[in-house]
Structure formats: structure tokens, C-alpha cells
Image (cartoon, helix red, strand yellow):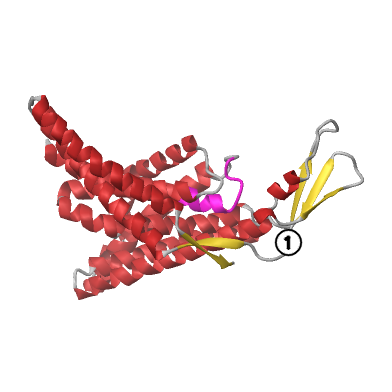
């Protein structure tokens, strides 16, 4: 009983930690219900992906004449194209017209959520077949790869959602899907050669991570700059407008309040200097990494403890120490992970 529980936990925990990190980083958090549905839809598309992938791969069998051609067919036709296409459909057909999708940066949040939903169920299937070693390897490689191709696709879809014309929108949508397929396919191709070239999957992964972070930070910076041009406060005639209120509305408290000639409108014109964007320090990333690894290990410990306590009756002299041994490190690693989310940060000019 303990083995299935431990394998299931090791398959699920990495995706949930990444999802928690994405949600905690969002300055305007999306509705939890919509995120949960997007996550579950991302997992559900595993069902249609399998037959479509098998069909596409069968079409490419004629080109399988060597190591690289076989790897390319398996990577692109059997994995990247069907998987990224169905993730795209979740975003385009389900999330696209939701009222909560009200800023370009939301595309990254929903793209990552759908991708992690898919990665979670896929992980369960792979880990159930390959064991704990596969779980650890995929937690460090395949899960982040899914997450960051979701970031990249979501960044392009977020821009497309608010594009000025149809031609620009179509170009951004095509680019988002195309780049996600290309990066995913390149990563899988190197792995599926099953030769020394499989080590090149790591640079492919790092390319996705680096570009995804850059796109996310760019959208975040644009969002901040867009909000620093003018803040308008409308109020009732009988409402008393305090001098401090406009300053609190301004970014970093900059700006001088002015009341327009039209009664009931207050405007705060902000500084035109670029805002300062917080940047995580190495110590912050270290806390996040150690906290995430520790929580993953604690999740496995809790599953093992549950299997031990539920598998056969034990007395309180055994149950209490087991629960204490699990609870104390879990609480400590949870505090460490939350502390990493909060900082420390370095303030740099955007």
C-alpha cells in the first residue's frame, strides 16, 4: 500500500508546488475556481491526446529510417504537437472569453496552470510504470519543461487577447503554439535519441526556462508602466477626499494630487520615471529550492506514515511519534518556502 501512495505523491507534489509559486507571484490573483477548472481541463486532455498522438506517430513511421528520424517522429508527432495543441485549445476555447482574463499577464498564469494539470496526470502515468527514480528525474526536468512551455504559450496568447487587429492576433496565436511545439519537440528529440545526445535536453530545458522568465518579467514590467501614467479617482460629492488618498494610489507614493474643474473627479499624475521592480536574491531562490525539495520529501513521508498507520492497527505509543516526526519538518519547510516567496528582493531600475 505504501508504494502506490508514495509514487502518487511524488508525481503530484512537484506540479502543485510550481502551481502554488505561480499563484503566489500573481499581483492580481485569478479566481481560484477558474484556475482549478483550468488545471483539471489540462489533466483531462491526456485522454484525447493519447489516441491522437498514436495516430500521428503512425503516419510518420515511413520516415523512421535512423536514430534521429525516429526520435523526431516520436518527439514531434507522438508528443509535442498533440500535447501542445490540446493545451492551446484549453486556453483558446475555455479561458479566452472569461471575464477574469483581463490583462496580458493572465495568459501566463492560465497557460502554466493548464500545462501543470497535464504534467501532473502524465507524471502519475510515467511514475506508476517507472518508479521513484523516474519521479525524481521528471520533477527536475519534464515538469518544469511543461510549465515553461505553458508560460511561453500563455505569454503570446495574453498579448493576442488584447491585440489591436485580427492579423496581429492570428500571428501571436500562431507564434505561441509554434514556439511551444518547437521547444517541447527539441527537448523530447534529444531524450528520445537514447544516446549521449540526450544530455542536450538540459540546454533545451534551460532555454525554455530562461525565455519563459524573460517573457513573464517583460509582461509584468509593461503592466507596471501602464499603471503609472495617470490614476483617476471618482468620488461622491459628499465624500471627503483626503490629501493622503491620492498619494496612496500612486506607485511608490509619487505624484501631486490635483482636483479638476469638473466636480467629483480627482487625478493623481505620477512620476514618469520607470518604476523599480523587485528582483529575487540568490538567498530567496535558495529558500524556495530547499523549501520545495523539503516539502516534496515531507509529502512522501506523510504518505508512508499514512500507509503504516492505516495498514495495520498500531498503538498511540507508535502513532504519536510518527506524526510528530512528520509534522515538525513539514512545518519548518513550509515556513522556509513561504519565506522564500516573500523575499528578500533587490530593487533595480526596470
Q: Residue furthest right?
A: 261
Q: Closer to the camera, 190 or 288?
A: 288
Q: Position of residue 45 (x, y in %)?
A: 37, 44
Magenta residues, start to end: 100-111
Residue 254: percent from the left, percent from the top? 71, 57
Quarter of the image for residue 81 reads bottom left
Residue occupying image coordinates x 40% and y 50%: 339
Left or right: 180 with respect to 294?
A: right
Q: Is residue 203 magenta?
A: no
Query: In percent of the image, x 15 and y 39: which residue is there?
Result: 304
Q: Is 104 part of what is drawn in magenta?
A: yes
Q: Is residue 188 left or right of 218 when viewed as pictured?
A: left
Residue that carries the numbered disc 1 in the rendered image:
271
At a point 33% along the width and 45% down the height, the residue shown is 334
Give the structural element (helix, strand or loop) at label 1: loop
Point out residue 64 in the picture as x, y percentages from the top left corner.
Answer: 24, 68
Which quadrant: the N terminus?
Answer: top left
Q: Quadrant of the C terminus?
A: bottom right
Q: Residues within 10 Å of mark 1 (few under 14, many from 20)?
A: some
On the question of residue 165 being in view, the answer is: no
Taking 240 as reference, is 167 above or below it? below
Quarter of the rendering containing residue 242: top right
Q: Residue 297: x and y, percent?
A: 22, 48
* Left or right position of 172 against 315: right
Amino acid at each position: 500500500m505504501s508504494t502506490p501512495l508514495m509514487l502518487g505523491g511524488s508525481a503530484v507534489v512537484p506540479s502543485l508546488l510550481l502551481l502554488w509559486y505561480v499563484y503566489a507571484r500573481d499581483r492580481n490573483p485569478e479566481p481560484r475556481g477558474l484556475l482549478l477548472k483550468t488545471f483539471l481541463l489540462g489533466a483531462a486532455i491526456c485522454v484525447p491526446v493519447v489516441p491522437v498522438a498514436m495516430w500521428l506517430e503512425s503516419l510518420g513511421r515511413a520516415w523512421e529510417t535512423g536514430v534521429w528520424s525516429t526520435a523526431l517522429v516520436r518527439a514531434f508527432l507522438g508528443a509535442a504537437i498533440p500535447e501542445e495543441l490540446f493545451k492551446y485549445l484549453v486556453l483558446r476555447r475555455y479561458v479566452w472569453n472569461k471575464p477574469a482574463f483581463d490583462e496580458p499577464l493572465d495568459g501566463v498564469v492560465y497557460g502554466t496552470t493548464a500545462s501543470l494539470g497535464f504534467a501532473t496526470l502524465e507524471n502519475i502515468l510515467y511514475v506508476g510504470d517507472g518508479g521513484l527514480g523516474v519521479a525524481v528525474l521528471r520533477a527536475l526536468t519534464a515538469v518544469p519543461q511543461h510549465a515553461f512551455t505553458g508560460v511561453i504559450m500563455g505569454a503570446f496568447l495574453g498579448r493576442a487577447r488584447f491585440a489591436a487587429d485580427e492579423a496581429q492576433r492570428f500571428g501571436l496565436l500562431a507564434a505561441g503554439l509554434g514556439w511551444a511545439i518547437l521547444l517541447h519537440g527539441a527537448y523530447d528529440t534529444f531524450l528520445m535519441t537514447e544516446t549521449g545526445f540526450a544530455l542536450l535536453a538540459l540546454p533545451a530545458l534551460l532555454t525554455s526556462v530562461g525565455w519563459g522568465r524573460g517573457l513573464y518579467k517583460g509582461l509584468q514590467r509593461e503592466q507596471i508602466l501602464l499603471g503609472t501614467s495617470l490614476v483617476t479617482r471618482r468620488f461622491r460629492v459628499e465624500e471627503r477626499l483626503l490629501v493622503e488618498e491620492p498619494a496612496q494610489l500612486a506607485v511608490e507614493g509619487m505624484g501631486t494630487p490635483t482636483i479638476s474643474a469638473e466636480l467629483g473627479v480627482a487625478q493623481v499624475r505620477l512620476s514618469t520615471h520607470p518604476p523599480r521592480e523587485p528582483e529575487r536574491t540568490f538567498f530567496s531562490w535558495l529558500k524556495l529550492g530547499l523549501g520545495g525539495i523539503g516539502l516534496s520529501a515531507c509529502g512522501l513521508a506523510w504518505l508512508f506514515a499514512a500507509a503504516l498507520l492505516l495498514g495495520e492497527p498500531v498503538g498511540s505509543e507508535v502513532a504519536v511519534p510518527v506524526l510528530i516526526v512528520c509534522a515538525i519538518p513539514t512545518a519548518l519547510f513550509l515556513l522556509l518556502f513561504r519565506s522564500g516567496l516573500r523575499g528578500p528582493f533587490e530593487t533595480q531600475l526596470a
